[in-house]
Image (cartoon, rainbow, N blue to C red):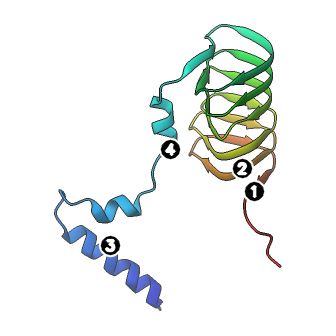
Amino acid sequence: MPSYNDEQQQGRVRRASEQSSADTSIFSTAIPYDAGAAWAEERTRVAVGHNVNVSGKLIFNEPVRIEGRFRGEVRSVELVVIGEDGMVEGKVCAPRLLVMGELRGDVVGCDRIVLGTHAKVFGNIEARNLTIREGAYFEGGVRMTGFANPK
């Protein structure tokens, strides 16, 4: 037997489908914003270029993209993008992180992380929000931060 919430949801879907295709106001609230796609298009500075191997500690004050191989620690006050051919082995600390390549290490201090469809992540993630796209691989632990402990 359908519950009241099921009937209510079906009513919303019916009403939405009855509206013209030009009016997307109902659908815009139902479909979540895809941060990964928007971040991939965001203007970034390439810190480690394609076919480059670097090790050490990178600290940035602007959005940055890693297309090559990096071993060490990455810190940024902005967005960090690990490109599809990029590989980071080490710790990453940034408010926004988009992984489209490979990450082997821990992620700390993030507000929002998106794992793209070809991402491979091996390590622990500490973040407020985590989005894992279909096709991504994740092996590790997740600790959601910024929420009060339930008692």
Judging by the rendered image, the residue that carries numbered circle 2 is 127
Report crowding for label 1: few under 14, some 14 to 19, many 20 or more residues within 10 A (C-alpha).
some
User: What numbered label is drawn on residue 145?
Assistant: 1
88 vs 35: above or below: above
Q: Nearer the viewer, residue 138 or 86?
A: 86
Q: Earlier in the sequence, mark 3 or mark 2?
A: 3
> In which quadrant of the rendered view does residue 138 lie?
top right
Q: Calculate the distance from the C-alpha at mark 2 to the C-alpha at mark 4.
A: 15 Å
Q: Nearer the viewer, residue 66 or 10?
A: 66
**What residue sits 41% from the left and 58% below the top?**
31
> In which quadrant of the rendered view does residue 66 lie?
top right
Name the quadrant of the C terminus: bottom right
Q: Earlier in the sequence, mark 2 or mark 4?
A: 4
**Residue flagged by tag 2: what amino acid is it?**
Ala
Report crowding for label 4: few under 14, some 14 to 19, many 20 or more residues within 10 A (C-alpha).
some
Judging by the rendered image, the residue that carries numbered circle 4 is 35
Q: Is residue 69 left or right of residue 83?
A: right
Q: Earlier in the sequence, mark 1 or mark 2?
A: 2
Residue farthest to the front?
61
Q: Calculate the distance from the C-alpha at mark 3 to the C-alpha at mark 4.
A: 25 Å
Q: Are discs 1 and 3 less than 8 Å apart at CB?
A: no
Mark whose residue sits in front, 1 or 3: 1
31 vs 120: above or below: below
Q: Are discs 1 and 2 less than 8 Å apart at CB?
A: yes
Q: Calculate the distance from the C-alpha at mark 1 to the C-alpha at mark 3.
A: 34 Å
Judging by the rendered image, the residue that carries numbered circle 3 is 13
